[in-house]
Image (spheres, rainbow, N blue to C red):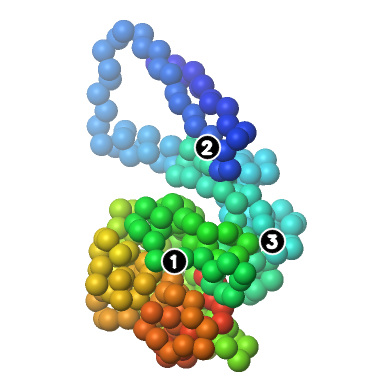
Amino acid sequence: MSYIPATLAKKEDMPYSDFSSCWLFEYSGSKPIEKDDKDDKNDKDKDDKDNKDKDDKIAKDGKPKDCSDILASGRNKSGMYTIWTGESPTTRKQLRVYCDMETDDGGWTVIQRRGKFPVQQDFYKDWESYKNGFGNVSEEFWLGNENIRVLCREGCKIRFDLVDEKGEKGFALYQNFTLTSGNYRINIGGYSGNAGDGMQYHNNNDFSTKEKGDTERANKHKGGWWYGRGGYHCNLNGIYQPDKYDQANVFWMNWRELTNLASAEMKVRPK
């Protein structure tokens, strides 16, 4: 059996263009050879190595997988960049992201931002909106649960940078972060920082929105988040309400209780 690659060209009029590839198969007509479990494992190991080699080639060819690749290429200014994200090299798509190249040695891909902007982004969204992402990447936004999952499928660090209404800064850094497919259950741990371990109470919770998951809390707090077991100790996707003390705020309980934060960012980097 031989393989003939066929690649589909990108559409220039799409903001995030997909690159799709397929494989055409030519069969000789002979009976398929049966394989045992050992052969399957060897094939899988070879496929894994081939995928890694292709990943490395993509980075070298100027198609970075995340902001850490961009930093490694010598581009060290914070700002907007294009990365290539996907489950495998043949299914990657372009994605515009904001890279933080200054905080804690740089290379962070920002996945969420809240703050005061001329137009405040509505975060009281449905499941599909949170899955695919919304907002303006240079202002307030959510990068999308599926994009975040793929970015961190092999494990990431995640950092929460917070600023209160007096301009004082806090942060929470976690050494381990992943999301599962489907319900985007969070696995997070290894805390350090000065804002308190707010996410320990949300660990192992599925993501919830106003119509899916823990809808009661999602509607109470006016945004999608990892609500559920252990109550709630932070929510950075609530309503941005300066000078208010409210459970629907953008808040980090361990640090400033329910007081609305002036700004917040979530960012990830490979471990």
Q: How many marks?
A: 3
Mark 2 residue crowding within 10 angstroms, few (<14) / some (14–19) / many (20+): some
Question: Relative to the observer, which residue lies in front, 266 or 236?
Answer: 236
Measured Cα–Cα span from mark 3 to mark 2: 23 Å
Sequence-first tag of 1 and 3: 3
Q: Secondary structure at mark 2?
A: loop
Q: To which residue does mark 3 refer?
A: 79
Q: Are marks 3 and 2 in contact (CB under 8 Å)?
A: no
The residue at 60%/56% (across/down) is: 97
What residue is at 39 percent from the left and 61 percent from the top? 125
Q: CA distance from mark 1 to mark 2?
A: 26 Å
User: For mark 1, what is the residue?
Assistant: 123
Check disc 1 and give the amino acid type. Answer: Phe
Q: Is residue 136 above or below residue 264?
A: above
Please state which of residues 220 and 56 is positioned toward the viewer in this rendering: 220
Mark 3: amino acid: Gly
In the picture provided, is 104 more to the left or to the right than 186?
Answer: right
